[in-house]
């Protein structure tokens, strides 16, 4: 039997609220679920109590699956830790705003396992899931 060492995740953990619980419940299963307005048909992210486009409270949740693609809409490269829990060895950190191909929304996440110089606006990315503890997985990105 091998010995396992439990390492606590020191970075901030996104909190589950009444407005975003379906999003995080799906993320924890490595799936993307998005809020959609039944009146105007627009997806919204981050989720809220009403549609961010038309204000309607008629919103539902639609599963998008686990194969999510997008393109880099904007990004910043952080060369220093900026929040508690982030360490110098985490840098440089590529933080991107990614526009999803099919849903016409943007989601923020890190682009993992890449050289910062390889990241460009318009570059294709795929969502990947990082299990940060036993209860939470967060969406991140990898270059395609």
Image (tube, rainbow, N blue to C red):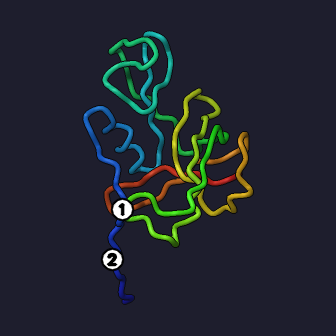
**In the depicted structure, whether residue 95 falls above or below residue 86:** above
At 63% from the left and 63% from the top, the residue drawn is 113
**How far across and down, in percent of the image, does residue 121 sit?**
71, 42
At 68% from the left and 58% from the top, the residue drawn is 116
* Label 2 CA crowd tier, 10 Å (few <14, some 14–19, many 20+): few
Disc 2 to disc 1: CB gap under 8 Å: no
Left or right for 5, reference 33: left
Cα gap from disc 2 to disc 1, whole angstroms: 20 Å
**In the depicted structure, whether residue 103 falls above or below residue 13:** above
SS type, badge 1: loop
**How far across and down, in percent of the image, does residue 78 sit?**
56, 57
Which label sits in the foreground, 2 or 1?
1
Left or right for 119, reference 19: right
* Label 1 CA crowd tier, 10 Å (few <14, some 14–19, many 20+): few
**In the depicted structure, whether residue 115 falls above or below residue 27:** below
Q: State the residue in front, 79 or 8.
A: 79
**How far across and down, in percent of the image, does residue 16 sit?**
29, 43
Query: What number is the disc on residue 33?
Result: none
Residue found farthest to the left: 18
SS type, badge 2: loop
- The mark that comes first in sequence, 2 or 1, is 2
At 30% from the left and 47% from the top, the residue drawn is 15
Query: What number is the disc on residue 84?
Result: 1
**How far across and down, in percent of the image, does residue 31 sit?**
47, 44
Q: How many marks?
A: 2
Q: Which residue is mark 2?
A: 6
Work out which quarter of the rendered image holds the N terminus and state it: bottom left
Left or right for 105, reference 37: right
At 34% from the left and 27% from the top, the residue drawn is 48
């Amino acid at each position: 039997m091998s010995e396992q060492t439990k390492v606590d995740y020191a970075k901030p953990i996104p909190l589950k609220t009444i407005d975003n619980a379906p999003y995080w419940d799906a993320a924890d299963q490595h799936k993307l679920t998005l809020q959609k307005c039944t009146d105007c048909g627009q997806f919204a992210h981050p989720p809220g109590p009403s549609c961010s486009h038309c204000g309607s409270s008629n919103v539902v949740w639609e599963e998008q699956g686990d194969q999510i693609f997008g393109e880099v809409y904007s990004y910043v490269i952080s060369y220093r830790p900026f929040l508690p829990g982030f360490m110098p060895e985490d840098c440089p950190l590529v933080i991107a705003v990614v526009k999803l191909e099919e849903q016409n929304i943007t989601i923020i996440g890190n682009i993992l396992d890449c050289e910062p110089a390889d990241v460009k606006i318009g570059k294709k990315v795929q969502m990947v899931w990082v299990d940060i503890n036993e209860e939470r997985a967060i969406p991140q990105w990898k270059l395609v």
